[in-house]
Amino acid sequence: MPILDYTNRKPWEERNKLPKPSNDGLKELFADVDMVIIKDGGVYEDKAMYNNVLLTINQADKVRMFHQLMEINEKKTGFYCMCLGTYAIELYSHNNLKATIGFHHGVSIRYYKWNGDAELAKIDNLLTFLAEQGFTAPLAERIEAKRNMEPDRVAERKWLEVAPKCFRKYREQINGLDEDYYPSLISDLNLEIPDKRKQIIALLQTFGKTDNFWTAYPSYEELPKKILCTFEIKDIIETYILSDRNYKTRKGLGRLLCSFEFKKNRKKHLKYITQEVIADLEKCFTWLGDKAGINEISKLKNDKNNS
């Protein structure tokens, strides 16, 4: 077997020529299908990676039901799961393999002739149906995932309470991979907080609201950093100095100045980052007892001293 890209993702230029996932496209795949076989493991190109059969559906009414429950949420397509899938769904017509669909974590599907993945619209009903046929693992995994997600939901709600109010409007898009919403969010943010200094402080405090400053944090926490990076660093530092310099703001500023992406070009910005600002950040992360943060601010301090 060749060395695999874990996403099996084609270059954007090629993907852009492919059709979007759609229910009409799914209907074409299911035309004349009289048997569905689900196998363990994912899909590479158009082939199941393993031959371990977990479920066979060959009754006409149940094949139709399976197709109906595979409905795509057409508003959430085009993203790419970072793996080759959990299961392979093979569609047969008169004993001939017609198509193979990747089934990802019980929530989305991938077909190699589409430009990306597609979220399923009837996830819980689909997994219940599969469990009724004797294939219980996806439903059990879904139940366990929901149980484990509750602390994450609480953390997200607390984060949104700190964030600019307009972030709540785009919660689903922020958690997705489609960034078409971004210009609208920026427009709403400018209406909500027209003063750029106040906007910077709000974004710093939002970026500072986290349980994990450096690794294993949820993707939505990247948004305030992305917006902050559209400002000049000298303006961010000046805004901080003119603020009340509270610890909520310090946490966000320290996280920004020590983020992996910012450190790549930090040297050219050191002239704006004063010793006074570094001392504030040092006090903040020492007070937090965040060892990684203390280490990061120490590196920033050394960079400044050696500049």
Image (cartoon, grey):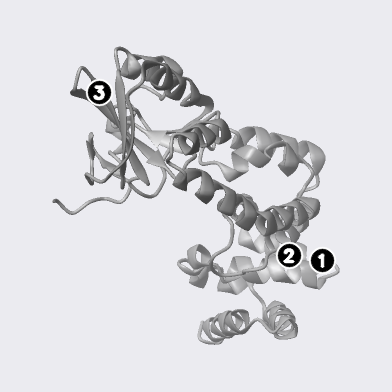
What x and y, as percent, mark residue 103?
39, 39
Residue 231 shows up from this direction: no
Q: Nearer the viewer, residue 233 or 142?
A: 142
Identify the residue under disc 3.
92
Q: Secondary structure at mark 2?
A: helix
What x and y, as percent, mark residue 56?
32, 32
Residues tagged 2 and 1 counted as in contact (Cβ below 8 A): yes
Left or right of 102 in this view: 282: right
Q: Secondary structure at mark 1?
A: helix
Left or right of 2 in this view: 212: right
Disc 2/disc 3 C-alpha distance (Å): 65 Å
Amino acid carrying mark 2 in the image: Glu
Amino acid carrying mark 3 in the image: Tyr
Identify the residue under disc 2.
238
Amino acid carrying mark 1 in the image: Leu
In which image quadrant can residue 288 be found?
Answer: bottom right
**Residue for point 67% across, 80% down:** 278
The mark that comes first in sequence, 1 or 3, is 3
What x and y, as percent, mark residue 158?
77, 56
Q: Mark 2: few, some, or many residues within 10 Å (few <14, many ≥20)?
A: some
What x and y, as percent, mark residue 65?
46, 20
Disc 2/disc 1 C-alpha distance (Å): 6 Å
Identify the residue under disc 1.
242
The mark that comes first in sequence, 2 or 3, is 3
Q: Nearer the viewer, residue 17 or 152?
A: 152
Q: Secondary structure at mark 3?
A: strand
